[in-house]
Amino acid sequence: EFSGACSGCGETPYVKLVSQLFGDRAIVANATGCSSIYGGNLPTTPWSQNADGRGPAWSNSLFEDNAEFGLGFRLTLDKRLEYASELLPKFAGTVGAELVDAILKADQSTEAGILQQRGRVQLLKEKLEAFVRSDDLSRPGKAAEAATTNQAKELLSVADVFVKQSVWIIGGDGWAYDIGYGGLDHVLASGRNVNVLVLDTE
């Protein structure tokens, strides 16, 4: 619900739709403006979570640099995915080569595919956690395996990135068409996988 908006606001149905379609994996970069008022009217928040406890990650940016702020989300996700994809094959013997292959080659073009990938990633995390728990480095000869254990912990910390994330850059016309248009043009020209929602109050 977006009860912090003005009565009859025409922007909120679109933002709500984003949350309903992509909410369990949405990352929102929000430009200062109306959407930051009704979207972050603390101490409450209209952004909610589903039955599994998943919901949008939302953060407000300065008025003029929101496009670059959202691009930073995308670049970070891409770099973390690259790193996780380098680490994962090293644990084929621990978690199973089939699981590694399925995660790296997963088709996430549909919601069903994303749900299946989420299940694979959960299984990966459980196997990595069991591996870390079972590795007693105090035993003789175990010190040499410390690097592997540390890599398992690092992979655990980034494993969720294997599930496709949806980056949204949201702001009003003042940001998109005026003070922030140069940054928005730059981000669109980059060709990176981001979504832009301009809430035009004019």
Image (cartoon, grey):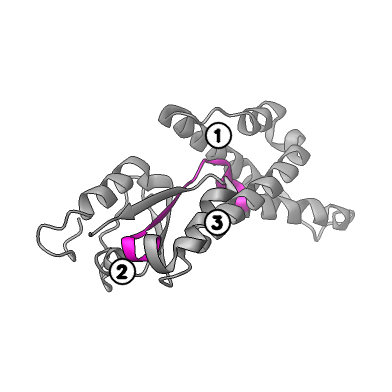
| Picture quarter with the C terminus | bottom left
Give the secondary structure at mark 2.
loop
The residue that mark 1 highlights is 120
**Residue 98, horizontal then vertical, whole percent:** 67, 26
Q: Residue at x 67, y 50 (%)?
A: 155
Q: Mark 1 or mark 3, which is nearer to you?
A: 3
Q: In whole angstroms, how far apart are the C-alphas of marks 2 and 1?
A: 39 Å
Q: Nearer the viewer, residue 36 or 44?
A: 36
* Range covered by the magenta-colored residues: 158-176
The residue that mark 3 highlights is 186
Residue 164 forms part of the magenta stretch: yes
- Residue flagged by tag 2: what amino acid is it? Gly
* Mark toward the start of the polypeptide (2 vs 3): 2
Give the secondary structure at mark 3.
helix
The residue that mark 2 highlights is 33
* Mark toward the start of the polypeptide (2 vs 1): 2
> Is residue 64 positioned above or below 8 on the image?
below
Q: Are marks 1 and 3 in contact (CB under 8 Å)?
A: no
> Is residue 25 positioned above or below 68 on the image?
above
Q: Residue at x 16, y 62 (%)?
A: 3
Give the secondary structure at mark 1.
helix
Left or right of residue 20, residue 151 in this image: right
Query: What number is the disc on residue 42?
Result: none
**Residue 70, horizontal then vertical, whole percent:** 49, 58
Q: Label 3 crowding class (10 Å Cα cut-off): few <14, some 14-19, many 20+?
A: few
Left or right of residue 115, residue 4 in this image: left
Q: Mark 2 or mark 1, which is nearer to you?
A: 2
- Residue flagged by tag 1: what amino acid is it? Arg
State the image quarter where residue 41 is shown: bottom left
- Residue flagged by tag 3: what amino acid is it? His
Q: In whole angstroms, how far apart are the C-alphas of marks 2 and 3?
A: 21 Å
* Mark toward the start of the polypeptide (1 vs 3): 1
